[in-house]
Image: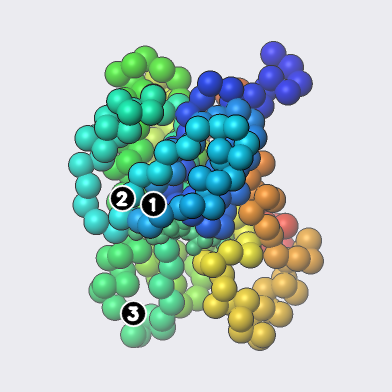
Amino acid sequence: MSGAGLFDLTGRTALVTGCRTGLGLGIAEALAEAGADIVGLGSSPMPEAEARITGLGRRFKAVTADLSEPHDFKALIAGIEADFGAIDILVNNSGIIRRNDVLEFSEQDWDQVMTVNLKSLFFLSQAVAASMVARGAAGRIISIASLLSFQGGIRVPSYTASKHGVAGLTKLLANELAGRGITVNAIAPGYMETDNTAALRADPVRQRQILDRIPAGRWGLPGDMATAALFLASPASGYVTGTVIPVDGGWLAR
Ligand code: NAD
């Protein structure tokens, strides 16, 4: 296989969590441009994702599920697959952040972040992988990690713990699923312009501190990392598994 075929997702279906906005929307669009149909899973409606995906001539299905709540993920996936078709690619993108000083940080802010960012990510991956294994199908699992999968951060203890967990789970899932033809990787975005970073960008001091430290000299955009997701979802990356790929304008190199 060569050229565009290495990045062709025609006939594939991708489930992307949290594709209402930001990075998830950019990823869903990139996968659809490469030919994939998209299932968007999120806690609220995602009309913009539906308009953009169907505008590209691909099918789109919205599934409402709040990932801060417990779910029977195996039943959820079985229902989606019965209605829309088998899932070939899972993108665990949904994520939340809570900011407070270590000395003030609440148990609620710990539990909510850990549930959305880590517990639900694991059990959703388990459910999708179980279906792939039962079908004997090759598949792709891609999770959105963070620079805080590598660094400590400030005032975001549950976020840092969850994203370190995402990096570890990526490696564990890759080890157990490689022999089944399923690759498992993560992407660590740098500082990207989305709702997730609106508070940071609104603070002139933090905004300047962050910008001054990014070798590329600008914040990232959803399109900057959607191409990394396309690579990990496509035939081009068949021998890549268990990695966390930074897309950070050089932040970690500094
Ligand atoms: P965002 O706030 O625009 O998107 C987060 C998405 O998660 C939204 O679509 C939202 O609907 C969904 N979501 C939130 N709570 C949910 C819940 N309870 N159930 C289901 N879905 C839920 O922010 P973003 O920056 O696009 O974040 C996407 C991912 O990228 C997150 O995992 C985030 O941690 C990660 N990330 C972002 C940055 C950045 O700079 N923006 C950096 C590193 C990592």
Ligand 1 contact, mark 2 (Cβ < 8 Å): yes
Judge from the rendering whether residue 144 lies leftward or rightward of residue 57; answer left or right: left
Q: Which type of secondary structure does the marked residue at label 2 adopt?
A: loop
Q: Disc 3 designates what residue?
A: 105
- Could you tell me residue 64's position as x and y percent? 33, 49
Q: Disc 1 designates what residue?
A: 42
From this view, report whether residue 103 is shown above or below residue 2: below
Q: Earlier in the sequence, mark 1 or mark 2?
A: 1
Q: Are marks 2 and 3 in contact (CB under 8 Å)?
A: no
> For mark 2, does the 10 Å Cα neighbourhood hold few (<14), some (14 to 19), or many (20 or more) residues?
some
Q: Nearer the viewer, mark 1 or mark 3?
A: 1
Q: Nearer the viewer, residue 14 or 58?
A: 58
Question: Which residue sits at x=75%, y=65%?
Answer: 218
> For mark 1, does the 10 Å Cα neighbourhood hold few (<14), some (14 to 19), or many (20 or more) residues?
many
Whole-number angstrom distance, CA of label 1 to CA of label 2: 5 Å
Q: Disc 2 designates what residue?
A: 65
Ligand 1 contact, mark 1 (Cβ < 8 Å): yes
Let me know if residue 17 appears in the view. yes
> For mark 3, does the 10 Å Cα neighbourhood hold few (<14), some (14 to 19), or many (20 or more) residues?
some
- Amino acid type at image mark 3: Phe
- Could you tell me residue 71's position as x and y percent? 22, 47
Judge from the rendering whether residue 199 lies leftward or rightward of residue 206; answer left or right: left
Judge from the rendering whether residue 39 lies leftward or rightward of residue 213; answer left or right: left
Question: Which residue sits at x=35%, y=56%?
Answer: 43
Q: Nearer the viewer, mark 2 or mark 3?
A: 2
Q: Earlier in the sequence, mark 2 or mark 3?
A: 2
